[in-house]
């Protein structure tokens, strides 16, 4: 075990200790972690009108009719369409997770529909 003495700027660490009573202690110790994030932190653009939707439809994959119609319906009903942008190459582990997993497994948010949320890029 490493023991630090002195002050380390902008650094934090912790240790974890587990008591393991499993028969095969060589098996992975897999668990699920639940976190809460604000997807609004990843909003690149918000579409508020049909004119704006028409102007960007080719830029964000609205070329598929289903996506376009869902976005169109959202705006007609008085809503807005948020375009989120994440990248897996900037060192942000949350963005990497969203890129890989997409939005398919997130808990449903009341009055919010995922128009496009595939991961695995």
Image: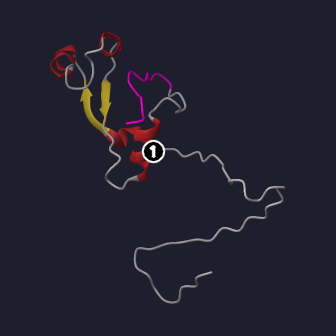
Looking at the picture, does residue 16 appear above or below residue 45? Answer: below
Looking at the picture, does residue 2 appear above or below residue 15? Answer: below
Query: Which of these two is toward me, 27 or 73?
Result: 27
- At x 25%, y 16%, the residue is 63
Looking at the picture, does residue 4 appear above or below residue 19? Answer: below
Picture quadrant where residue 50 is located: top left
Which residue range is magenta in the image?
110-121
Residue at image mark 1: 97
- At x 84%, y 59%, the residue is 21
Residue 26 in the image: state x and y as whole percent.
73, 58
Residue 116 in sight here: yes
- At x 40%, y 40%, the residue is 99
Residue 38 in the image: state x and y as whole percent.
43, 42
- At x 42%, y 24%, the residue is 114
Quarter holding the N terminus?
A: bottom right
Residue 59 in the image: state x and y as whole percent.
20, 25
């Amino acid at each position: 075990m490493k023991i630090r003495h002195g002050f380390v700027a902008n650094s934090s660490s912790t240790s974890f200790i587990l008591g393991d009573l499993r028969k095969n202690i060589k098996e992975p110790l897999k668990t699920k972690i639940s976190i809460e994030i604000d997807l609004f932190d990843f909003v690149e653009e918000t579409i508020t009108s049909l004119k704006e939707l028409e102007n960007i439809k080719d830029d964000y994959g609205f070329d598929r009719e289903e996506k376009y119609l869902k976005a169109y319906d959202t705006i007609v009903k008085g809503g807005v369409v948020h375009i989120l942008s994440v990248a897996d190459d900037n060192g942000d582990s949350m963005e990497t997770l969203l890129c890989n997993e997409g939005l398919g497994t997130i808990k449903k948010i009341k009055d919010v529909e995922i128009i496009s949320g595939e991961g695995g890029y």
